[in-house]
Amino acid sequence: MSEIQRVHSTERMSRIVKHNGTIYLCGQTAGNESWEIGRQTEECLRKVEVLLAEAGSSVDRMLSVTIYIRDMKDFSAMNAVWDEWISGYPKPARACVEARMARPEILVEMSVVAAAID
C-alpha cells in the first residue's frame, strides 16, 4: 500500500495531500475578503501556484480544478482572470458552481488536483 502524505495539517484539514503521484490541494481563497472578484481570483491562482510547487508539481500538471463562486454575476470577471492565467498552460478539466461560502465576503474558492512531477 502506498503512503499518503499530508502537508500543513490542522485539526480540520490538510492544505496538501499526496498519494500515488497525485496531489490534492484544499480549497484556496484570497485571504483578503475586501477585494473584488478579479483580485480574489488572482490571489487564489497565486496560492495554487505556490502550493503546487511546494508539493512537487506545477500549473501545467493540473488535472482538475473546481471553482466555487459566490454569485454567477461574477462569472465573466472571474473567467477573464482565469483565461489570462491559464492561456500558456495545458487546460485541466474544470467545473464552476455557484455556492454559499463560509463567509459572504469570500467571492471565489478553488480546489485543485494535479499530477506530481515524475
Image (cartoon, rainbow, N blue to C red):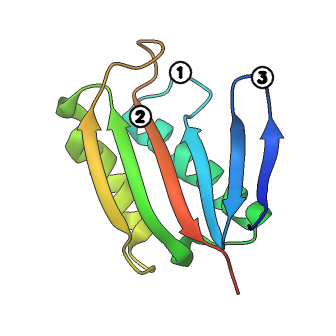
Residue displayed at 72% across by 39% down: 14
Is there a contact, CB below 8 Å, between mark 1 and mark 3? no
Give the residue displayed 63% in from the left and 62% down from the top.
23
Disc number for residue 100:
none
Q: Amino acid at mark 3?
A: Glu
N-terminal-most mark, 1 or 3: 3
Quadrant in the rendering for residue 75: top left
Residue at horizontal 78 percent and vertical 48 percent from the top? 6
Residue lying farthest to the bottom in this orientation:
118
Q: For mark 3, give the secondary structure.
A: loop
The CA distance from mark 3 to mark 2 is 24 Å
The location of residue 108, given as percent across then percent down, is 41, 34
Q: Is residue 95 left or right of residue 84?
A: left
* Left/right of residue 80 with respect to residue 57 in the rendered view: left
Q: Which is nearer the eye, 84 or 112?
A: 112
Q: Nearer the viewer, mark 3 or mark 2?
A: 3
- Residue marked by disc 2: 108
**Where does residue 112 sit, x and y in percent of width and height?**
51, 54
Q: Which residue is mark 1?
A: 33
